[in-house]
Structure formats: C-alpha cells, structure tokens
Amino acid sequence: MKALGVGLIGTGYMGKCHALAWNGVRQIFGDVPAPQLVYLAEADADMAASRASAFGFRKSTGNWRDLLADPEVDVISITTPNAFHPEMAIAALEAGKHVWCEKPMAPALADAEAMLTAARKTGRTAILGYNYIQNPAIAQIRRLIEDGTIGTVNHVRVEMDEDFMADPEALFYWKSEAASGYGALDDFAVHPLSLLWHLFGHVQEVIADLGKPYADRPVKDGARRAVENHDIASVLLKLEGNISAVLMANRSAWGRKGRIALQIFGSKGSILYDQERMNEFELYTTTGPEATRGFARVLTAPIHPPYDRFIPAPGHGLGFNDLKIIECHQLINAIAGNPSTAVTFEDGLRIERSVHAMAQSYRERRWISV
Amino acid sequence: MKALGVGLIGTGYMGKCHALAWNGVRQIFGDVPAPQLVYLAEADADMAASRASAFGFRKSTGNWRDLLADPEVDVISITTPNAFHPEMAIAALEAGKHVWCEKPMAPALADAEAMLTAARKTGRTAILGYNYIQNPAIAQIRRLIEDGTIGTVNHVRVEMDEDFMADPEALFYWKSEAASGYGALDDFAVHPLSLLWHLFGHVQEVIADLGKPYADRPVKDGARRAVENHDIASVLLKLEGNISAVLMANRSAWGRKGRIALQIFGSKGSILYDQERMNEFELYTTTGPEATRGFARVLTAPIHPPYDRFIPAPGHGLGFNDLKIIECHQLINAIAGNPSTAVTFEDGLRIERSVHAMAQSYRERRWISV
Amino acid sequence: MKALGVGLIGTGYMGKCHALAWNGVRQIFGDVPAPQLVYLAEADADMAASRASAFGFRKSTGNWRDLLADPEVDVISITTPNAFHPEMAIAALEAGKHVWCEKPMAPALADAEAMLTAARKTGRTAILGYNYIQNPAIAQIRRLIEDGTIGTVNHVRVEMDEDFMADPEALFYWKSEAASGYGALDDFAVHPLSLLWHLFGHVQEVIADLGKPYADRPVKDGARRAVENHDIASVLLKLEGNISAVLMANRSAWGRKGRIALQIFGSKGSILYDQERMNEFELYTTTGPEATRGFARVLTAPIHPPYDRFIPAPGHGLGFNDLKIIECHQLINAIAGNPSTAVTFEDGLRIERSVHAMAQSYRERRWISV
Amino acid sequence: MKALGVGLIGTGYMGKCHALAWNGVRQIFGDVPAPQLVYLAEADADMAASRASAFGFRKSTGNWRDLLADPEVDVISITTPNAFHPEMAIAALEAGKHVWCEKPMAPALADAEAMLTAARKTGRTAILGYNYIQNPAIAQIRRLIEDGTIGTVNHVRVEMDEDFMADPEALFYWKSEAASGYGALDDFAVHPLSLLWHLFGHVQEVIADLGKPYADRPVKDGARRAVENHDIASVLLKLEGNISAVLMANRSAWGRKGRIALQIFGSKGSILYDQERMNEFELYTTTGPEATRGFARVLTAPIHPPYDRFIPAPGHGLGFNDLKIIECHQLINAIAGNPSTAVTFEDGLRIERSVHAMAQSYRERRWISV
C-alpha cells in the first residue's frame, strides 16, 4: 500500500484529534505506511497556516475546496460543524477522495442519505468518526458476547452523560437552537447507538421521552431566550434478537464529564463499562465457586489488542486520543480493502435513522419502527 | 404512650425481620415503650411454637385469626405471601388492630382498594413495609433536595436489580406464574417507586416495556413450562414538577444482589446512591473551586439521624435489618399520632396504581396517566 | 444450656452495643437460650436506672460491685474506659462470673497479665471485644487463605484510619494524655492486630515509627497544651510463616471514618477488604482466561455464614452492631465449651505484648522481637 | 529556539515511548519546534533499520556511538537496560549532547555519581525519565499542597505494585539476579520516590524491610535457581518538614498492574491518587456542611494544565504515553533554559541515594540517614 496523502478540514477539538491520529498511526501500528500530512483547510487562512505548522501539514488554505483539486490528497478528514458535513463529504467523494467524516452525518436525514448515495456511487471509502467503539475494552467485551461467555444477551442499558449544558445561567448558544438538531439525541445518542450497533446490531423499534431542564437561557443583554431543543433523552428500544434496551442521554448532568456507561445482561453473566474509566470493564460470570463470585474489574492489557501496540505492560492506560489512532488504523484498513471495524456511511445512516425515529416517537407519543 | 402488644403473622424472611424490629426498637431509640411480643401465628402450629420461642413471643398459634380476638394484641405484622394480605389486613383492622403489612398490598387493585377502605373506616394506623426509604442516607438525600442543595431536580433514574431469577435452568416456581403478578413490576418496581414517592411525590404518567429473558423454565420431570410474567421492566415516567424519570427493574440481572441505584440530576448538582452500598451516597455540587469539583462520597454518620441512635461513630455502617427498626419506630410514631415517614395504605395504593398503569401501558403500547 | 444471666457495666458506645447483642443473639441465632438482662451498672445511679429501662435490664445500680454478688448474674460485660478493665475483670472472674471485656485489656502490660492470671485461675470464660474479626466477609477471607485459594501468603498490609483526632483546633482531651496510652497504637492498632492474629497467627518481630501531627492542642482558656502521645503509627512486622507485613494506623486521617483496609498477597492470588464497605471483599486469582482476570468484588451473602442467620438474601448488608451479635454468639459458644472464634485473654495478651513491643521499637529505634 | 535533532538508543518499551513523545510534542503543545527524528540506534542493525522506518527516524545504526559523532543530533534518548546507562549517558554528554535517560541512573551509586559529574562538567541538560510526576492530576495535587488546601501535610503513604514477578513458576530471568539490583527497590521504589520528591522534597531517613516471596524459581532444564534479590520492599521514611511516610513496593502483587497509590494526610484535608486510574484523584477537605463531606472524585479536565493541550473536554482521559509527551515538553523547556519540572541528574541522584540507604538499612537492621 502506498502512503496516503491526507487533507484535513477543520482544526478544532476533532481537527486536532484527527491530526494526532494521522501523525501517530504509523509509529503505533508499524504495519501501515506513514501518512503524508499534505493540506489543511480552516475558514481563516492565517489560522490555517498557523495550525498547519503546528500539526505538521505542508500546505494550508482558507478554502476547503482547494483540497479537492490536489492530486496529492487521497483522503480528507472532515471535522467541521455538522451542518457542513454533507456538502464537504459529497464534494470530496466526487473528487475521488476517501472521506473520514465526524459524526453525525447531517442534521437532516435527506442530507445523510445523499452522503451515502455519493459514497456508493464513487466507490470511495467513507467512514464516520465513531471512536468509542475502538477501545480495546470494547473489543474485548464484543469477544465476550460473541464467544458466549455471558450467554444470550437479553437486556442492555446504556447511558451517555456530560454536564456542559448543565448550568442554567450559561449563555444561550447554538447548541440550544432547533437548527442544530434535537439536542441530546443527535449530539449524544449517536455515540451509545454506535456501541449498540457494534455489539448487538441495529435498533428495531423505539419510544423516546425528551426533557428540557431549562425553558430558557440568558442572552447577552440580560434578556432570556427560549431553549429550542432537549438536553435530556430517555428511550426504550428493541434490538435485534429480542434484546430489550434502555438508552439515556443527558448533556445537563452535573458531575458527569464523559460518562458512557454500559450494562449488559445475559443468561450466563453480565458486563459493565464506563467510558470515564475507559481502561477497565467489569465481568460477572456464573463460573467458579459461588462464595467467590462477583464483578471482576479487568484492566485492559496487551492481551486485549490493539492495546499491545501502544504499551507492552498491562494496566498502564490508553487515552481518549489513542482511540482515534485505532480508528485511523481501521480507516486505512478499509481503504486497503482489509477487514475493518470502522463505521461506514451505510451503518451510520442506520444509526441516524434511529435517532429520527426517536424524535418522531416523542412527537407522536408512540412506538416507532426504525 | 402505653407499650404496644404485638402480633406477628408469618415467620419467613420478613417475619423474622419484623420480630427483630419489634425486639430492638426500644433499645435503639429509647423514646418508645418496649413492645410486648404477644402472639405469633404461622400456618403450622408446631413451627409457630418453635419460632415463638426463638423470636421471644409469649404465645403461638396455627390459626392467624386467634390474634384478632386477643385483647393484648394492639398491632399486627403481616408478613405472609402477598395474596393473603387483603383478607388478613382487613380482618385485623376490623378487629381494631393497627396493621404493619409487607408490600405490595395485593396482586389485584380492587383488593388493595378494599384494604384502604378498611383502614379509613376503622381509623386504625395501617402502613406498608417499605424499609428502603428509612435509610439515614435517603433521609439526608431528601434534605438535600428540599433545601435546594442540588437546585431544581429535572431528571431521575432509578434501577432495581437482583439475580435470583437469572438462572434459566432454575426450576419453575410460583414467581413465574401470572397469578403472582406482573413479575418485576410488582416484585421490584414498588421499591423504587416508594423512593420516588418519598423524594419527589407521585408518578403522573408512564410507558413501560417488559422483557421476558427466558420463554420457559424446567419443571421437575425434565419438561419445561412457559414463563407467564416478565422479569425485566423498563419504564419512562413523568413525575410531579415536570421531572422526567426512568425506572428499570430486573430480577434476572446476574451479579446484582440488592442494587437500588438512584441518579438524581438538578440545576445545581447531582446525587447518586446504591443500596448495595447503603451506608454512603455521592453528591456533586457547583460550589467551590472548579478544579476540585467531583462527586463526594459521603459516609453516613451520627450527623445523619437516626444513624446516631445506632452508633455514635461515623462510617461504621448500618445493616438492612436496622432499616426495619427505623420503620418500626416510624410506625409507633404514627400510632401515637406523631409525624411519621411510614408509607400509609393511602400512599401505598398510589404506588400500586402506578404499577398497574405500567402494565396497561405495556399491553396497550401507549402512555398511560396514573 | 441454661439461659445466661447478664450484667453490664458501662452504658456508652460499647455499653449500648453489648446490650443490643445480648438482646438480639437468641432471635438471630435461635440455637442459644435467650439471655436474661439482669443487672446494669453505671457510675451515676439515676442514669443507670434510666439506661436499664431503655436497654431492658431488670435491675440497676451505681455500684458495679453489686453485680458480683448477684447469683442471677452469670456473665459480665465490661465496657468502661480501659483503665478500669483490670480491677473490674479480675473482680468479676474471682466472683465466678464469665467476662466479656472491651479491648484493649489495660494500659499497663502488668495489669493485662494479671487479668490473664485471674482468668486461668478461675477457669471462667474471659474474652475481649474484638468484633471486626466476626464479619462473615472476614470468615470467608480466612477460608480462602486456609483452603489455598490464594496460595501461600507472603505479604500483608493493613491500615486503620479515622479522623476524630484530625482537627488541630479541637480541644485537648484525655485521648492525648500519655496516661491513656501510646495513642494510635493502643487505640487503633489492636484492631488490625486482631485481624492479623485471626488470619495469620501472631506477630514475631516489629519496628515502629510514630507520628505526632500536632505538637499541641487548645485548652479551654485559650492556651495550648502539649500533646503527649502519637496519633499516627507505622509499623514493619514479621508474621508467622515468613510473611512480611506493614501496619498503619492514623486517628488524624481526614476523611477516613472507619477504614480498616487489608491487602493480602499470596502466590496464587490476592484479597482486598475495607471495613468502610464491610459487606464486600475483593479477590484476584490466577484461574480462568487471562483476558478476563481482575479483582472480583464479592458481596457477602447467605453462603457466607453466619450472614444467613441475619438475612436470607445476598448483598443486603449487615451493620456494625450485627458483628457484636456474632461475637456474643461466639462468647456463648465458648461458655458452653463449644468451638469459638472469640479472642481469649490469652490471645489478647499476645496482641498487647506486640503493641508494647512496637512502642519499645520506636523508643529504641530498632527491631524488637515479641 | 531551533528544532532539536533527536537520537534514540534502544527501541523496546521505553524506546517506542520516547519516539512517540518526540513525534507528538509539537502537535500537542504547538509552542516548540518540531523535533527532527535523526538517528536511531539498536544493537541489531537490521532491527534498527526497521524500527527507524516505523518510528520515522531518518537514519539508523547498530552502533550507538554513531549518534555521538552526528552534528545533526542535539539530544539523545537512552532507553537501554540500566547497566548501559552510565557509559552511554557520559559519552553522550561529553559529545555535547543533551541526555534524556530512562530511570534509574545506574545499578551502582558510583556510576550514578559519575553521570552527574559529567552533566555538571559539560553543562548539558540531563534528565531522567520519571514520567508519572508529569500527570496533570499530580500537578493539581501539587498545587493543592502548595496552596494550603489540605493544610500542613503530616503523613504520607505510597504504594507501587505490579504482578509481573508474582508467578512462582515463571522462569528465572535477569530481574531476579543480584546484578540487576536490589529488586523492588530499584525497579519500583524510584517511581514513588520521584513522586515524594516532586510533592514534598527529599527523603531524610529510612528503615526498610525486604521480602522474598519465592526462594527459587524454575530454570529451563527443570531445575530451580535461587532468587537473588527481593520482590517486596516496605519502608518507613522521614521526609522534609517532619512528615512521616511509608513506602511499599511489590512486584509480585497478583492483580496489581500499574498501581501507584498515594495517600496524603494534612491538617485540613486529605488527597488520594492511584495510577491505575490516572485520570482522577480524590480530595477531602473540611469546608462546607459536615453532613455532605466526603472524598470528592475529581476527573482531570482542561482546567488542569496541560490536559487542555490534549483534549478540550473534561473527563475524557489521557493515557500513559501522553505523560511521556509532557515530560518531553519539560525536557525541551529545560534545554531552552525555561522552568521545567523534569527530574535532573542532581535530583535523580538524591533519589538513588535514598534507595541505597534503604538497602543498607535492611542489611544493618537500623535507621539510616540519606
């Protein structure tokens, strides 16, 4: 495989995270050519230049379309606000580039569908930035489900909670606008849904309740503006294989910083996981003497690949950014035609369909099939 | 107040627990007369005699109606299977006895209503055995909600999980029969509902999903019998004051032994609690320097009454049986006409109405008002 | 066995705890006659009468020697300050009573020796109030050590920490006087030493360092008084069987309320325990697939006797006072000539010898054999 | 500042970790020139070439001395076994290179002293690879100590435990040879000592006990070979400022994978930390209402620099390798003459002196001043 030429659009939180991943993937994994950091785009050309220097990109531009025309660019990371994803992703695909687009695909379902159509038509590799599923702990949990360690799964609960919207006196900003989406459903629920998909397959049927903890928020002049979407979502779900599930998302949950908590119950055992302690999971099984059964807290270790590519000693801990390196490796695998656990536009669209079904189920107060 | 004469019907799990409470309440609290353990009834007269000796009751009988006629008996503890509650409670009330009946009131709503009618008509004190609300940790949590420490509560999650029905190869027994009730809803959900009621008031509206992890279970001759109710319940709820809530109950949750986990989110903080670690709770508030904010794990202590009546040192731990002693003290308070946090038949009926509404919402696949 | 007549001297923290134990032991265990609460002594006669009423004792007195002469009294609980233990225990033994004396035996080693001599001479049962060893979790840990589950133990750490002496501005009181003893060594270290003895046998050799966090403390008139003993003790120990151990005790450890933490390392596994979460322990073993090994958090349950005598359901939790009931049951076993895990004066003296050796090792700055 | 040219000797665990740090430091921090990965040395020239390609170094060699002569190399990372450190570090310094040497300096104290002499003589920057002190959580703990949040510290406990030597049937290898050093003291204790130094200053006086859990281990032919050093170390220490401390290290502690646990007790509060959960710490203070005091679990966040350079969202988690990037940044700061928290050869020598004092205190069974 030849080295990939990389273009990056956007240099915020996820932009830097993508840059780190492209920069580190060869050193960590060793089995892929070192990506060439070719071209970085940021709305402001000066900032683009400065970030290109910091991130190690050779060229920079204030116009993202410049990346499309560059023959050195093979793959484009799209890390801009969600509303820009469709235009950029479709243009990139049509220019023959592979695409690594941050989640979710788009606020409107029709746009997401157009993105998938473009991916199919061009035959380029197109994946979404679902990094949490790439944790070696999650890979081990998936193995434990697949190999029957906890028997047949019959019930799942997943929670995603942070507190960046928890302060009722924080100034109104775009995340509270209806134009940004449903709120917790788009902003958060897609992550736990990616985990549910990765571990159990797709969602079949949903009914949601949405909560608006604060009716309005202050704006700069001392007035207040009505909040237009919902910071809290609670959803009953049916998964494939008759698994009942509950999904809870709350971006106004004081004290929660990066919680994505899984509880998985099977006929022979249970598994617990919390992203705030991403280097461990808990397993209960019915093996061994009854007097010593309990949830075992397992620390991730070289025995849980690809942890071994990062550190040869157990229990020393990966970080959030490391997950993006694993995801980048999966993307390169996908581009090379190898098996990959990256989330394709096809699977991503299924995730977003279920989000829209949840919103509909709330509006219509009834169960909705996805 | 004169000493109460106590009758006890039933000597199983809860029977012994009531006996311990009646026996200990005077020593622990000091401010109530020592109850007189008068009369114990158990279906088998010999066992009744043996248990009366062990538990310290003066008299015993194989016929529970003997207690009704005994003028020394002022109050009757009813700890038999649920199906017997209505007949016994109504008879006891009509005989002029106060009643301490284990929860839930009755499998059928009409029977529970008749119990409340009897309590109202006779004017006797009639309470239900909801012990978890009596934990000093819960009392402290209630104070933190009432005094505004966590601001206005906007979202609550509560889980109750054990694993006594988790083994799919355990023999079919009466808990899987439809006649015993809905399953997790009656057997479990009433406990978290008592906590929700105690902390936030009554449930307004519900929609439930029920799960049956195992379609059938073995019977003795090697055949299998279909399971008739549901071991898993997941419910979206609206509480008073526009609080959105999720209630989850699972009696087939491998590894969970006595979990009743609360997550309470407010505009200024959050509270966490888990009955498996009943001597602590966690509190997050927005006070103090941001760099040191986190969930504080608070161990219960003499500053959290009535912990001080049990132990003068902090962090030494109460046990499950101690909660029943507190409940017994609340019952005596109620009989004496003093303020009491015991759950009356009136409040208990509201709890059971919400359980029936949940079952209906599952059957009809729609939201139901309670 | 005939019912024991009980005398109780002292009605503070431990006095009430003994009363609760005598009152509850028959109901909980069923296999011993109900103790008769005969005679209660407290320095103030009025208070004695009031406590006798509250605790259920038939008679009361302001003179503890009255108990010695009472033929109805078979056994005497001594729960007064440590300095009174020798006189009372020896007098009680010489009056033919069994003795249940709170720990430690006496501030001076010679007094403790005299107590043992009296016990041997009279042949009465004489035990010390070491309750923590009676926890069903500790009993299970002992079984796991004995049955080889964690192989040969080679290293142990034990910590006992509370914070009642942590405030440097709290008024000077008797616990800081040299006359009360060494400080953390007598006040605290005896508890972890009882656990080490119970699990591993006696201490062979020690070297201690003592710490005085605050040189002086305020007295009422605004002046300050020098602290005369040490709130912190750190000790290296050799146990039987070439086990190296570390004992740490700190009664000025802010935030610790009732911590007694054990870490036990063996050739095939490890065990963790913390008294602040007394209803659980953690076990790591080298069995099972390496990818799922971790410390299993085991909740105590009916399978861990005598938990089953208190509650038939797992994970529901015993309390601190329940341990004293188990200890009382062991005392009755000992009086009846049955096997017992209660700490005899003989074993208790060995514990106190090791405390004095620790103090000597600190003064002389060298290892001391016990 | 001009870009540093980097040489790397050794490509094992720490070699890769250094390579990752040099590769990532510019992207993460942005305020330093991108290091140039110039020259990689590994004993085997082929492996050197392969690793140079994987790690992104331009040149490779089988002879580490080639790096000394290369004018493009400004700084050399030394990640070989400890016995090679002195020769390599001294040669590098004398060749005018800055040195980043993995800890500990050398098995023999005289060699470590010679390393310091070389650093002083050449005036080059020479630091040791103590990464754990670079954790943003540790930086915050240091601020809390310095700003008086927990008052005057009076007692500290630190534990470092892993289990890579726990299996008694694992084949004898060089870590059990006396030539490799004392065992847990060199291999482990230097890490907690770096934390003690970073937070409290240098050790004054020590007494140690060493434990040998297994007298011998198997060798290949089925025979057994005597173990020559000690896998367990327990040490009483006096720190600056009259702080009493206990250091415990165990490399045969089943179930521990990367535990470095700190307990810090002060006159106004306490702090807890465990490297196995490196993205959090716990703080107890005496502020706020007594009824809600408890250890607060604080998740690291952008407010704890330099966490913000990695991730702009709280609670998302750094990894072990990220600490090395911070350390690399501190090294570049030191080379540039800016303030730095890196551990110089001067401080490192003090750490190693205390290790040798511990070993002496064990041999001579007495307290030793450092």
Image (cartoon, coloured by chain):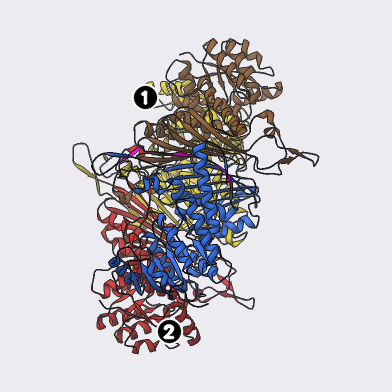
Chain colours: A red, B yellow, C brown, D blue
Instruction: Write down the chain letter for disc 1.
Output: B
Residue B264 position within the rendered picture, expressed as x and y whole percent measured from the top left = 51, 56
Q: Check the image and name the residue furthest to the left.
A: B222
User: Which label was assigned to residue B44?
Assistant: 1
| Front residue (pair B65, A315) | A315
Residue found at x 69% / y 19%: C62
Which amino acid, mark 1? Asp
Mark 2, residues whose alpha carbon is within 10 Å: few (<14), some, or many (≥20)?
many
Give the main secondary structure of the magenta stretch.
Answer: strand
Circles 1 and 2: CB distance less than 8 Å? Answer: no
Which amino acid, mark 2? Ala
Q: Report whether residue D363 is seen.
A: yes
Residue found at x 65% / y 26%: C81
Q: Is residue A181 above or below residue A252?
A: below
Gap between marks 1 and 2, in whole Å?
A: 84 Å
Tell me the residue that label 2 is attached to. A41
Q: Check the image and name the residue furthest to the right.
A: C221
- The reply to whether the magenta stretch includes residue D368 is no
Q: Which residues are magenta?
A: D204-221
| Front residue (pair C124, D12) | D12
